[in-house]
Image (cartoon, rainbow, N blue to C red):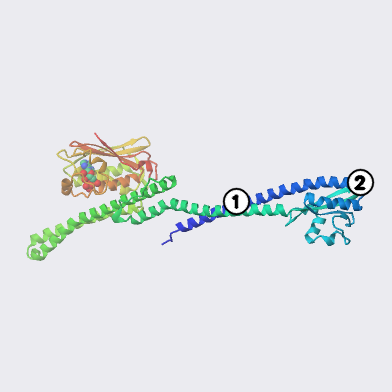
């Protein structure tokens, strides 16, 4: 048996949503970080640009390497939150700055700052400094101006906002997981309920059905589909049960008769020749009955298992009908069989089975006849096909029985059929045969006046059973 997978569905959905949530968080954090950095950087850039103008004016006034410019640069420090300012010439030599250095700028700046020096595009907020670097001309000398702003305040507030955001997102994550888990339980609850009910359904408990009042359309659809499936299984199970009980019922009588005659034979049969003969005849007759029943059952079972073979080949139906009716007349000499038959109707058919179907209708016409012992058989062309009908003047079929006569083991008048020896299987077999020849059966009947069973084959060249031909048509007149 396969393991229940509902928990893994839940885990998978949880995992997917958690992953989506994390990706959204990472995106939000990234956007936040980029925006705050950009905002702070643009403030420093603006300040840097205006300071460049002011320094240029001062350099023009007091000269680039002068003490006056150095003092001016130092004076800018506290006002603009500046750590250091350096003016570097084309050779990398610091020609003025807030701190006096002799070894050039490389000695002062750390490795990362060196990177900033040679690749000014990398300048930005670091753990405490913002480097504003620009190429400019001071007092007719082309220089690089480096202003190192103190960005620790900005950095700290950025970190603070970041921590707050991360905490909020984490709390959101837990709320999300809890709410998701609650929702998931609610969604999966009807599925668990369905599983429980389905487990309880068994052969003894076929009336149980799933609840179809769920709010989710998909679950409703699933419940309706499962219920439909159980309905179908129940119908087929009931049919099967009825079939087995009908078969047992039908076999009980011949077995009882055989067993009765067997006992009689043991007691008196050895001495009494009359009893001996009667018993042997009866046993043979009951065995014949059982053989007939078993053959019919075998045909129906094979049909249900799709293993009935129809050996289709061109058959002269006119000829077949004529000979079958003639034979039937010989078996029932007290009956008149009137034949109105168009000649030369050739049809692709299984000769034996087709004859079997016709015999079923002829036998029934005889079995259910009354005083008028007349059976009329007509074979006529009908468009591209033909119609073969068997009409009797017997008891007819009531409106209540008419829809059921093609059911297996259905007998309209059980007292009469006991007399006639029918099992209620003939018409279901005839129907299968006709359907397999792409035909339909039409019944016209009136209680007390007689019945007419017509086999209609609309296309003489049809080779496979068509779904449209599947249902017999009944009509009471
Ligand atoms: P059975 O072997 O009992 O005749 P069928 O399947 O051939 O079984 O027929 C089913 C029932 O249909 C019969 O029991 C009978 O009640 C009814 N029936 C069939 N043919 C005729 C007919 N020609 N006239 C009246 N009733 C008929």
Determine the quadrant in which ligand 1 lies.
top left
**What mark, if any, has residue 185 been given in the picture?**
none
- Image side of residue 296 versus residue 169, left or right: left
Q: Earlier in the sequence, mark 2 or mark 1?
A: 1
Count the numbered circles shown. 2
- Can residue 313 be seen here? The reply is yes
Q: Where's residue 367, x and y in %? A: 19, 44
Would you say 444 lies left or right of 469 here? left
Front-lying residue, 380 or 183: 183
Give the residue displayed 48% in from the left and 58% down from the top. Answer: 8
Q: Residue at x 51, y 56 (%)?
A: 12
Q: Which of marks 2 and 1 is in front?
A: 2
| Badge 2 element | helix
Q: In which quarter of the image is the N terminus?
A: bottom left
Kind of element beneath mark 1: helix
Q: For residue 245, what is the image quadrant?
A: bottom left
Q: Distance between the residues labelled 2 and 1?
A: 55 Å
Q: Which of 261 and 195 is in front in this view?
A: 195
Q: Mark 2 points at which residue?
A: 61
Q: Are marks 2 and 1 in contact (CB under 8 Å)?
A: no
Furthest-top residue in view? 477
Viewer can see residue 139 = no
Percent position (x, y) of residue 191? 41, 52
Q: Name the residue under label 1.
A: 24
How crowded is the residue under tag 2: few (<14 C-alpha within 10 Å), some, or many (20+)?
A: few
- 434 or 302, nearer to the observer: 302
């Amino acid at each position: 048996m396969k393991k229940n997978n509902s928990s893994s569905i839940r885990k998978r959905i949880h995992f997917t949503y958690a992953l989506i949530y994390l990706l959204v968080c990472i995106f939000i954090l990234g956007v936040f970080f980029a925006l705050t950095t950009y905002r702070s950087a643009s403030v420093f850039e603006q300040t840097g640009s205006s300071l460049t103008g002011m320094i240029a004016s001062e350099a023009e006034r007091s000269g680039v390497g002068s003490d006056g410019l150095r003092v001016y640069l130092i004076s800018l420090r506290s006002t603009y939150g500046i750590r250091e300012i350096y003016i570097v010439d084309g050779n990398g030599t610091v020609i003025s700055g807030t701190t006096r250095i002799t070894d050039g700028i490389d000695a002062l700046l750390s490795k990362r700052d060196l990177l900033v020096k040679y690749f000014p595009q990398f300048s930005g907020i670091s753990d405490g400094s913002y480097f504003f670097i620009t190429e400019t001309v001071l007092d007719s000398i082309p220089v690089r101006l480096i202003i190192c702003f103190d960005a620790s305040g900005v950095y700290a507030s950025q970190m603070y906002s970041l921590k707050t955001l991360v905490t909020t997102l984490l709390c959101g994550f837990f709320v999300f997981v809890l709410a998701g888990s609650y929702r998931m339980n609610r969604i999966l609850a009807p599925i668990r309920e369905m599983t429980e009910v389905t487990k309880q359904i068994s052969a003894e408990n076929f009336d149980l059905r799933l609840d179809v009042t769920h709010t989710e359309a998909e679950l409703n659809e699933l419940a309706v589909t499962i219920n439909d499936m159980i309905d179908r299984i129940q119908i087929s199970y009931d049919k099967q049960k009825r079939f087995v009980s009908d078969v047992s019922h039908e076999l009980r009588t011949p077995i009882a008769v055989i067993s009765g005659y067997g006992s009689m034979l043991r007691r008196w049969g050895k001495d009494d020749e009359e009893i001996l003969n009667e018993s042997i005849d009866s046993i043979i007759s009951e065995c014949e009955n059982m053989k007939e029943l078993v053959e019919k059952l075998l045909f129906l079972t094979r049909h249900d298992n799709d293993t009935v073979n129809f050996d289709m080949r061109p058959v002269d139906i006119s000829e077949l009908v004529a000979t079958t009716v003639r034979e039937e007349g010989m078996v029932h000499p007290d009956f008149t069989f009137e034949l109105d038959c168009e000649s030369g109707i050739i049809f692709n058919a299984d000769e034996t089975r087709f004859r079997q179907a016709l015999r079923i209708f002829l036998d029934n016409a005889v079995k259910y006849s009354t005083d008028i012992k007349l059976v009329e058989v007509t074979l006529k062309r009908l468009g591209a096909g033909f119609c073969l009908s068997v009409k009797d003047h017997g008891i007819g079929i009531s409106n209540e029985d008419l829809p059921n006569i093609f059911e297996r083991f259905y007998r309209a008048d059980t007292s009469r059929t006991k007399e006639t020896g029918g099992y209620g299987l003939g018409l279901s077999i005839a129907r299968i045969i006709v359907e397999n020849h792409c035909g339909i059966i039409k019944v016209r009947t009136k209680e007390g006046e007689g019945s007419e069973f017509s086999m209609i084959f609309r296309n003489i060249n049809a080779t496979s059973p068509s779904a449209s031909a599947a249902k017999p048509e009944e009509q009471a007149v």
